[in-house]
Image (cartoon, helix red, strand yellow):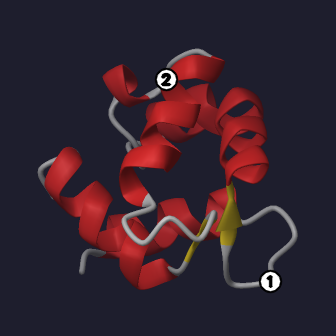
Amino acid sequence: MSDKARTLFDALDLDQDGTLTRIEVIRALREKGPTLAAQGVIPFWGVGDVDSSAALFDAADQNGDRVLSFEEFAAFVDRRFGW
């Protein structure tokens, strides 16, 4: 798993509990997405609207438990963003 995945996960984990919820991902990408893209943490095309952020979460939530662990998140974003 990439260092970029860890950096992005930590940036999106607003409550710092080690997991990501759908609301957390949507809110964090809306608030921090452009800055994260400018820093090279996420591709500019990876920053979208609420629907795009929700779709990213839903695609990463492979087991359907509505929570993303770092491992689940990293496996998805490493593939999705080509890291």
- Quadrant where the N terminus lies? bottom left
User: How many angstroms separate mark 1 from mark 2 (CA)?
Assistant: 24 Å
Viewed as shown, does residue 30 lie left or right of 70? Answer: right
Residue at (45%, 61%) from the top-left corner?
A: 61
Q: How far from the left and from the top, in percent, is residue 76? A: 28, 60
Name the amino acid, label 2. Answer: Ser
Element type at marker 2? helix
- Quadrant where the C terminus lies? bottom left
- Quadrant of the image occupied by residue 5: bottom left
Observer-nearest of 51 and 66: 66
Q: Earlier in the sequence, mark 1 or mark 2?
A: 1
Q: Is residue 3 above or below residue 30?
A: below
Q: How far from the left and from the top, in percent, is residue 34? A: 58, 26
Q: Label 1: which residue? A: 17
Q: How far from the left and from the top, in percent, is residue 46? A: 38, 30
Q: How many marks?
A: 2
Q: Label 2: which residue? A: 52
